[in-house]
Image (cartoon, rainbow, N blue to C red):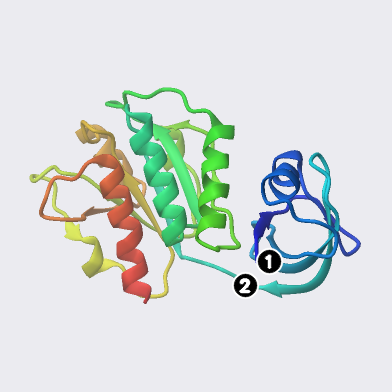
Amino acid sequence: MQLFYATSIQKGTINLDPEESRHLAKVLRLTTGDRVSAIDGLGNQYVCEVLSAHPKNSVLTILEKTELKESFKVSIAAAPTKNLNRWEWFLEKATEIGIDEIYPFKSYHSERKLLKHDRQERILISAMKQSYKATLPKLSELTPFKNLIEQSFDHLKYIAHCYEDIPRESLKQVHPKGQKALILIGPEGDFSKEEVELAIAKGFKSVSLSESRLRTETAALVACHTIHLINA
């Protein structure tokens, strides 16, 4: 069945937004009575029947609801890359693998200072639908690094960096199965030493992800996948 993202659900019906409605009515040419699936980004999946197929406001009748209760136990905080395509690749692939939260931040060596939140959300929604997930990752606004590490998290916290003179342990060796993880990933020029020391002082454990020096988006995806492998 075709899958749609639903943000307006009430009294047994779903009103699709204009973008999803156009896809249903104009692209797929679905009509009244056709069966489809819908997800709400909150972990719920619905079997539905098309009540009305209109390119601006299609309506679905809910026939069945399933709570998937997805929890991937991994959050990534990363400095977006100068090359926007590489950052968007990470958003897409991390969502396909499964991620709970994404925290973009600006650090000392960051080269990208602005992000379009709406564009990123569209990428996450598309990747969620493509991978048949029902949970949309929480995406925070771009924030300064120092503000980020001051926040309270109920995760085990890690900072991945490349400084050989600051003791590091392998993430896959130190993170316990079943626990939520938040991993900080630096920009192309890595964190500054001051930032690493500040994070450690705030309770972040110093870790490495690989024996290789990884690009920012690769490191972020490796961190995400590592937590999945630990919890497999």
Question: Which picture quadrant has residue 119?
Answer: top right
Label 1 packing within 10 angstroms: few (<14), some (14-19), many (20+): some
For residue 197, above or below residue 37: above
At 46% across and 65% down in the image, what residue appears? 73
At 50% across and 49% down in the image, what residue appears? 152
Q: Amino acid at mark 1?
A: Asn
For residue 47, above or below residue 86: below
The Cα atoms of the two marked residues, 2 and 1, are separated by: 6 Å
Query: Which element is circle 1 on?
Result: strand
Q: Is residue 40 left or right of residue 174?
A: right
Extreme-right residue of the structure = 11
Question: Which picture quadrant has residue 61?
Answer: bottom right
Residue 215 picture location, percent across and down: 22, 41
The residue nearer to you, when weighing 72 against 52, is 52
Label 2 packing within 10 angstroms: few (<14), some (14-19), many (20+): few
Residue 65 picture location, percent across and down: 75, 72
Give the labeled residue for mark 2.
Answer: 68
Give the labeled residue for mark 1.
Answer: 44
Residue 88 picture location, percent across and down: 41, 39
Residue 16 picture location, percent across and down: 78, 49
Q: Is residue 197 left or right of residue 103?
A: left
At 8% across and 44% down in the image, what residue appears? 165
Give whichever of discs 2 and 1 has the lower sequence position. Answer: 1
Question: Which picture quadrant has residue 50?
Answer: bottom right
> Is residue 176 visible to us here?
no
> Is residue 63 visible to us here?
yes
The image quadrant where one finds the C terminus is: bottom left
Query: Which element is circle 2 on?
Result: loop
At 58% across and 54% down in the image, what residue appears? 136
Q: Amino acid at mark 2?
A: Leu
Please state the total of marks drawn on the protein image. 2
